[in-house]
Image (cartoon, rainbow, N blue to C red):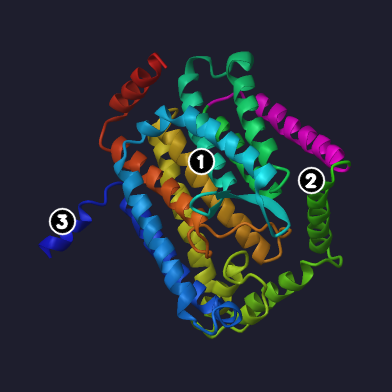
Amino acid sequence: MNRLQTILSNFKGDKVIWIVVLFLSVFSMLAVYSSTGTLAYRFQHGNTEYYILKHLFILLMGGALMFLSHKINYTFFARIANILFVVSILLLFYTLVFGSTINEASRWATIPVLNVSFQSSDVAKLALIILVAKFLTKKQDSITDFKKTFIPILIRIGIIVLLILPSNLSTAAIIFITSLVLIYIGGVNIKYLFYLGAAGIVAFILFIAIAKYTPHIGGRIGTWQNRVVTFMGGEGSDKFQVEQSKIAIASGGFFGKMPGNGTQKNFLPHPYSDFIFAIIIEEFGLVGGFFILGLYIILFTRGYRLVVKFPHTFGALLAIGLSFSLTFQALVNMLVAVDLMPVTGQPLPLVSMGGTSIWFTCISIGIILSVSRYIEEHSQDETENDTDDEYAGA
């Protein structure tokens, strides 16, 4: 018992978030193992343990990254924010030019020597949230100033969003909306948010117009159009998987068919990633679906409570930005599964089978835990003074 208490004492920060992560990981293991049977027979000669062991390794690596991140003082991320921002821009450029084409989108970059592929948008999303949180903290004295605060934020957000947009509309939209929420909480004049929203719409329209004459980008417009047409009830390549997802949800009932007994995993093209929520409802029922939804809501509320306690500090803005981004992405995945949104290709954070996407999710949660660890150990006045001193000469 004493040894167990010693081990648990190393896990600092919000204990509720640690419990949420544990439950999501357990559901992930069950759902991935159940939904990769067909994949195993197609590519691994029936070795059904291959994918679950690989997924377990990825989750364990993610847990290690989360643990390390939560041990780092969250103010460290403010110091490297500008470096991360520049690196993410370079990675996004590299992905647009040399990225691997997966699911009709050049969204994956490959490290030449290690031959490891990853989504550069994951790096960019994390970097932008850190940078915006830092910038809002520094500019609290001039937070309502259009030229000193709003325009610089708009430029930084615009660069990242426009670089992601050609290959991944849904991720660009998630980052853009997360930025809106973050700068609203940071205290920027609300009328400027309408300007930013309008600027985003205009930029998107211009992008569509330009892409019409750019074959490399124009192909993505066809994909977006097909998904919208399918969502509106028309015929499209995504219609089959949406219909199979709805069958899975309808057949799950209230309590589900129990783990491993679902059948729609044999028909859905991506039951282990994009549509894993449908498999969870089929096998765990509406009870399981609402339980998963509740876990993400709890994750968001634990981040939000830091903003309520310590408004306008870097740590609080960082925590709410990351928790909102993860929760919003989860909500998008769920809405797609129940046919309330067009297909986006967004994974369910920490649940869908993946590699680097899970690792970046774990790093994000680790940073949230780091914030809760260090902020809640100090009083509000001390935290605000520390933050102000840190940025006084920045």
Q: Residue at x 32, y 47 (%)?
A: 68
CA–CA distance in space, label 2 to label 3: 54 Å
Left or right position of 368 against 336: left
CA–CA distance in space, label 3 to label 1: 32 Å
**Mark 3 burial class by Cα count in 10 Å: few <14, some 14-19, many 20+:** few
CA–CA distance in space, label 2 to label 1: 25 Å
Q: Main secondary structure of the magenta part?
A: helix
Horizontal and vertical percent position of residue 352: 53, 64
Q: Magenta span covers which residues?
A: 187-212
Q: Earlier in the sequence, mark 2 or mark 1?
A: 1
Q: Earlier in the sequence, mark 2 or mark 3?
A: 3
State which quadrant residue 195 falls in.
Answer: top right
What secondary structure is found at the residue carrying circle 2? Answer: helix
- The disc labelled 1 sits on which kind of residue? Leu
- The disc labelled 3 sits on which kind of residue? Thr
Residue 270, disc: none
Labels 3 and 1 touching (C-beta < 8 A): no
Labels 2 and 1 touching (C-beta < 8 A): no
State which quadrant residue 380 falls in.
Answer: top left
Q: Which residue is mark 2?
A: 217
200 or 35, nearer to the observer: 35
Residue 6, disc: 3
Label 2 vs label 3, nearer the camera: 2
Horizontal and vertical percent position of residue 178: 58, 40
